[in-house]
Amino acid sequence: MDIQLAIDLTRQALELAFIILAPPIIANFTVGLIFSILQTSTQINEMTLTFIPKIIATLVALFISAPWA
């Protein structure tokens, strides 16, 4: 295997991984930020409160973006 071919395949694999993982990561970050702001404003310091909404947002983002991958 030529070194340039290995580099190109690695680059393409990383680009594909970024394209596939960007929507769930962005959804997870957004939901986490919103719930952190809500927790700060209501002074509720429960770390497990954000777990289920983050999971749901990640799964929804995966289902919506799955046809693109």
Image: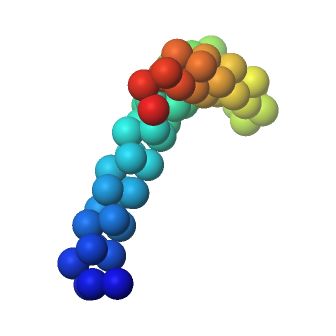
Image colouring: rainbow
Count of picture labels: 0
Answer yes or no: is residue 4 visible. yes
Residue 8 in the image: above or below residue 37: below
The residue positioned 32% from the left and 76% from the top of the image is 6
Nearer-the-camera pick, 50 or 21? 21
Answer yes or no: is residue 57 visible. no
Give the quarter of the figure containing the C terminus: top left
The image quarter in which residue 35 lies? top right
Give the quarter of the figure containing the N terminus: bottom left
Question: What residue occupies the far left of the structure in this picture?
Answer: 4
Nearer-the-camera pick, 26 or 7? 7
The image quarter in which residue 20 lies? top left
The residue positioned 73% from the left and 35% from the top of the image is 47
Residue 17 lies, in percent from the top left, at 44, 49
Nearer-the-camera pick, 65 or 1? 1
Residue 15 lies, in percent from the top left, at 33, 50
Residue 12 lies, in percent from the top left, at 32, 56
Nearer-the-camera pick, 52 or 63? 63
Residue 7 lies, in percent from the top left, at 27, 73
The residue positioned 78% from the left and 32% from the top of the image is 48
The residue positioned 52% from the left and 31% from the top of the image is 24
